[in-house]
Amino acid sequence: MVAKPGLDGHDRGARVLARCFRDAGFEVIYTGCHQTPEQIAAAAIQEDVDLVGLSCLSGAHRYLFPRVVELLKEQGADDITVIGGGIIPDQDFQMLYDAGIKAIFTPGATLDTIVSWVRTNIRPRGV
Amino acid sequence: MTDKEFNEMEQLRKIRAGDVRTASRLIRNLEDDLPEAKTAIKRIFPHTGRAHVVGITGAPGAGKSTLVDALIASFRKKEKTIGVLCVDPTSPFTGGAILGDRIRMQRHAEDPGVFVRSLATRGALGGLSKAVGDAVHVMDVMGKDLILVETVGTGQQEVEIINHSHTVIVVLIPGMGDEIQAIKAGIMEIADIFVINKADRDGADQLASELASMLNMVPEFPGGWRPPVLRIGNCFDPVPFGESLEKLAAAIAGHHRSLVETDLLGDRMKRKTMVEIHEALRDAILEPILKEMTKSGEMEEIAGRLLRKETDPYTIAEEVAHRRLK
């Protein structure tokens, strides 16, 4: 699931990623912009996704990303991996990793890198 | 009781209590066609048959998801609980899919009375996913009063939705063709309710009169229900949009009442069970044969013989049936 939390309407990147995962053979749920962490966690559980990719270009990632992880955990869904991307300063990486974000991709990361990270780290179920 | 039986009982109990996590996992297992998902359906099946299932179909971009979102809001005010299944197409090339119907409905994400689930077609024809019938059962057993099933954007022929719903809404928009389109077979025949969406646009009057003359030619409507034609305008014009939406919600409830009063609800339910038993038989009988023939290389060998015109498909089918089904 590709989601855009917070007050940020710049979703070109999120849509490019959704399309790229589609072309790589994934089923991608796109939630659209302006989502609260609560809406994102609820959608992830209702859809029973393997992975949530959060995109944030507004600078609010320090609150928004960890909050999604926290909400999933509260609802017994901490098996859902959360990764993030967007405009994230280097000095915030460690704080996000510590909060349970499993990977961070910033401008310059190629689509191939992101897809192969997912293929390596998210195992298909029932296999 | 074994652990396995205990877990299965626990799963049923949780789903009956409305637990979203358990239900969404089961729906996913159904999509993936896992054997344990079938076992679960065996357990929940006796408890199904309570919800009113409403299908919503129409061309891509006709406004189906936006209507579903507005219907959720309307029925929630009447304190109905709602399940939504929205189907989007799977790529025939990569197997991937973008499931985007949910975008229109995200304002309901935190409402515990609403459960929205996206499904990809995964190669199924007819505008739905193969798992949709069982996913409806799951939401039904969760206690949802109303289940809205949104098909992929449809053309003329994708009418599978009638097998899975009690009430079918066909969403049309102005400017999609002349009066001949209105008398064609297929999707125009399956509506219990017609919606002319984006009715503020040019051509809405013409479409309404074409639909009226098409309906005037029908000698008799089953149960006396003549499909109403409702106009719904721009959703960014909230007052008239809200009023026309309430008319649609009333028509949905009215159609359900009519089905119950005329005893036609049973017919619609039977239609679904017939499809289910056909599919289950195909899974149980045909699929294992096909799988084995493919695995053993027999399928390749048959294809070669057919290409060399040494035999024909009907003879092959008779031979296989004779050999395997006696």
Image (tube, coloured by chain):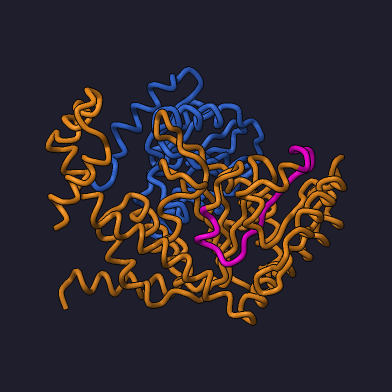
- Relative to residue B40, is residue A70 drawn left or right? right
| Magenta highlight on residue B162 | yes
Position of the N terminus of chain B by quadrant: bottom left
| A102 over B190 or under it: above or below | above
In the rendered structure, the colour chosen for chain A is blue
Q: Quadrant of residue B222?
A: bottom right
Position of the C terminus of chain B by quadrant: bottom left
Percent x, y for residue B286? Answer: 25, 51
In the depicted view, which residue is nearer to us: A48 or B197?
Answer: B197
Q: How many marks?
A: 0
- Which residues are the magenta region? B160-179
Residue beneath the point at 63% across and 80% down: B262
Residue beneath the point at 55% across and 63% down: B165
Residue beneath the point at 87% across and 48% down: B205
Asked whether the viewer can see residue A38, the reply is yes
- Relative to residue B315, is residue A3 drawn left or right? right
Percent x, y for residue A76? Answer: 38, 59
Percent x, y for residue B90? Answer: 46, 38
In the depicted view, which residue is nearer to us: B58 or A124?
Answer: B58
In the rendered structure, the colour chosen for chain B is orange
Percent x, y for residue B150? Answer: 58, 53
Asked whether the viewer can see residue B113, the reply is no
| Magenta highlight on residue B137 | no
Q: Quadrant of residue A98?
A: top left
| A12 over B2 or under it: above or below | above
